[in-house]
Every structure is written in C-alpha cells, then in structure tokens.
Image (cartoon, rainbow, N blue to C red):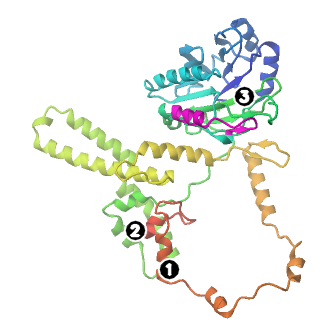
Amino acid sequence: MDCILYWNTRGACGKGLLRNLKLICSGPRPCVLILAETRTDMDSRFKCLSSMGYDSVRIIPSVGKSGGLAIAWVSSRAAVTVLQEDRQFFHLLCRIDQSSPFLLTAVYAIPHSNFREILWANIQRLSKQISSPWCVLGDFNDILNASERIGGRGGNFRRMLWFHEQISDCGLSYMGSSGPKMTWKGPCITGCARLYERLDRALSNSLLFDFFPDAYAKVLPRTKFSDHNPLLLCVGSKQGLGKAPKPFRFEAMWLAHESFSEFLKCSWSEQCNLPENLEEFKCNVGSWNREVFGFVERKKSDILARLNGMQKSPAYPRSKFLCDLELQLQSDLNEVLKAEEVKWFQKSKSIWISQGDRNTRYYHLKTTIRRRRNRVLALKDSNGHWVDREDEVKCMVIDFFKQLYQEDTSSEAQIQSVSNFPVLDEAVRNSLGIIPSNDEIKSSIFSMGPYKAPGVDGFSPIFYQAN
C-alpha cells in the first residue's frame, strides 16, 4: 500500500499508541508513519514501532510539553531522506515501492499566530526552490472557510483569508479528502456547542498530480486515544474502483484547424437527419484527429526538439533557410499552444478569465482537481459503513437505481380520486404540441455558454454555435 499516515497523537506514546495504530492500520500498513505533537524528546518512546515493521525512526524533540514530531518508515519499502527539519516541520525526499520520488513536508503548526507565520515563511522559502512533485500535509491549526468549523464561537474570517493566501502563494492547492469532514474534536465551551474543525489536511502542487494522478487523501475514524483524526495520504493507484470507457467529447480546439470546415462538410449528408450526421461525424473524427490534427502534446514536443536542434546548428546564424524555418516553427508552436490553452480551458469548465492570458497551467490544475473530486472512491451503505470494494460499490449503485425507478403504486388511488385539477384552456393545450421554430432553437443554443458541459451526445454548445 503506497500510503503515508499522519496523526496528531496529542502526546500519546508507548503501548497505547501501538494498540491504536494496529487498530487504524488493520489492513495493509502504511510504509511511512508521521506522528505530531508527540510531547517527548526521547527516541526510546518510539521503539515499540519496530514490532510493526517500522525499523527507521527520526524525531524532532518537543520543547517541554509543546510540539514534537516523529517519522518512522519501513526501509525495505520506502526510501526517506530528511532534507531539512525545524521545530514545526520535516522536509523529506520520499520514494515508495520504486515509484517516482517526491517531496513531502510534514507539519505541525503550533497554535499561536506568530509561530504559524514563521512556519509559512519557511514553507514559502521552500516553495521557491521546488520544481518536483510536492505534498505538504499535517495539522495546520487553521481553517479555510466557515463550513470547516462547527460549534464554538464564529471563525476569524481575516485568518481564513490569510490561510488561503499562504497556500496560494506557495503554489499549493487543497487535495480534498474522503471520510469525516472535521478532523479535530475540541472542548466544550460554556454557553457554546462543542467545537469541531478541519485542522488536518493535505496540500499539493500541480506536479504531484502529473506524476501521481491517482493520489488521494482519506480521513480515518477518530479513536478515544486522540482528539484528532488520522490522515492517510495514498500516492499509488486506488485499488478497487476501475475506469469506464471514455465517452466521446467534442474538442473545441478542432474548430481552429484550417481543414476542419472541409472535414465537417464531407462528414455531413443532407439525406440524413441530425442524429445520424452526428454519429457519422463521431465515427470519422477520431481518425481525422490522429492523422490530420495530431496530438497536441506530441506536436509541441516535436516542434521544440526541432527548434532546439536547429538553434544549436553552427550554420544557424548565417543561414537564411534556417532563420525562415525558425519563424515558421515558432508560428506553428504558437498555434499549438493556443490549441492547448483551449483544450485545458474546456476541460476545466471554468469561467474564461481573459483573452490575452488563458493560463494553461491553472486550467490544467483545475481539470485535475475536478476529475479527482468527481471520482467515487467509496460509498456509505444503509448501516453507515463505508464500502470501497469495486464489486460491492457496483452492487450498491445498481440496487439504488433499481429501487429509485421501481413502480410505486401506493399513491395511485389518491391521485385518481382528485377531481379538481385546474383545466387548461384550448389555446394553451394547442401550444403544447407546436414544434419549436428554427429561430427559437437557434436562440436557445446561442444563449448557452459555448464551453459548458456537453449533452449526452458529447457535443458542447460551441459545436452548434460555430457551424
């Protein structure tokens, strides 16, 4: 299991820790374990972890009874190098089960504003040196919005905004998580309901999803041992739920190609109705995309390789042919980049920011996050238990829709007995059967956002608007 477990144990060590860890890790065990707020400066308190296979341990001592971090890993499955450590974080280079290496910053933010500002200053300094997949996880002792707090007094909105800004300035985004929403159970305050907050979370840069597209975080159940929920970060493939075949989606970037209009005319027949023409187009556009339009990423890398080779040539500065070729390749590259921008904007389903700066990387990240949030990792059954096995999830979905669409005859008698339904006049009744005019259809289509989600046929509104 390519997973890392983070847990704020609130000073708990020894046999109680071992007992609860075995409970939490009852399935395949995480190969890296991070414990926060250990409140100890002794390595010996963590020797018990060796019985679970964690043969390597590194600690950051607490200051008195405040703070403290410990990391333990199974050396046969995980290669962990401590690059930097501080009172509030470990900065690590990790490689798990021969996967690609990535950077991991495990934090425990001391719950005082001046310490948290120091922590984020350090994280921001690290971010400027990082060009690799990177994850930052831990107890940040901050919330992002009011929905991450239940009970107690109202949240500090200025503090929430500050937390947002720190994450954004470091090029990070919240990964989201499955499981319980609140990760900390606070004390009862006189005159207020008990406080619950989401303090523990995983953040990542966009490169993490490039190398680990199936990475996800999961909040595990809280035990009596600590007032924090454990947080599980998985960087490998999610075992269980498979992928369905990809449905057809019209790509808006095709519209800009010089031969698209001609291809569309050849695929369209006046002897066929609209659904038949759309099906014919879908059958033909795949081969046209491969043979004529080309794959955007491959075209981009090919052009860059040609530019690089040409500009390294000794004859380049004095050759008119090479200079002209350079201009042509640069023009071709610009067209490819425009197509890439449209592609990722359409997939991100965002609002167009500006015509001059489409910010491809931003839309790429938005797309990745949206796909992850739409992916079903588990479902809760009627008994409140989470189910994540593929066969069981499929059965739950089938049973749900069978029950949903089952004929319900219990209300038929009541409906039939009602005799005072309002009566529609003849003009209204006649209007219900009128076929919409061409102008009405056109007005409806052009009122839609061009890049909004497609219908069941896979065609976005821009296909009809542009043709």
Mark linked to residue 440:
1
Outermost residue on the front side: it is 191
Number of dots carrying numbers: 3
- Which residue lies at the image location 58% right of the left edge and 35% below the top edge? 158
For the residue pair 326 and 63, the one nearer the viewer reads as 63
| Badge 3 amino acid | Pro
Q: Which residues are magenta?
A: 148-167
Quadrant including the N terminus: top right
Residue 93 visible in the picture: no
- Which residue lies at the image location 34% right of the left edge and 41% below the top edge? 301
Q: Which residue is mark 2?
A: 466
Q: Is residue 77 above or below residue 191?
A: above
- Residue 187 lies, in percent from the top left, at 79, 28
Mark linked to residue 230:
3
| Badge 2 amino acid | Ala
- Which residue lies at the image location 81% right of the left edge and 62% below the top edge? 403
**Mark earlier in primary sequence (1, 2):** 1
The answer to if 35 sits in the magenta stretch is no
Q: What is the C-alpha distance between the residues marked 1 and 3?
A: 56 Å
| 358 with respect to 311 (left or right) | right
**Mark earlier in primary sequence (2, 3):** 3
For the residue pair 232 and 286, the one nearer the viewer reads as 232
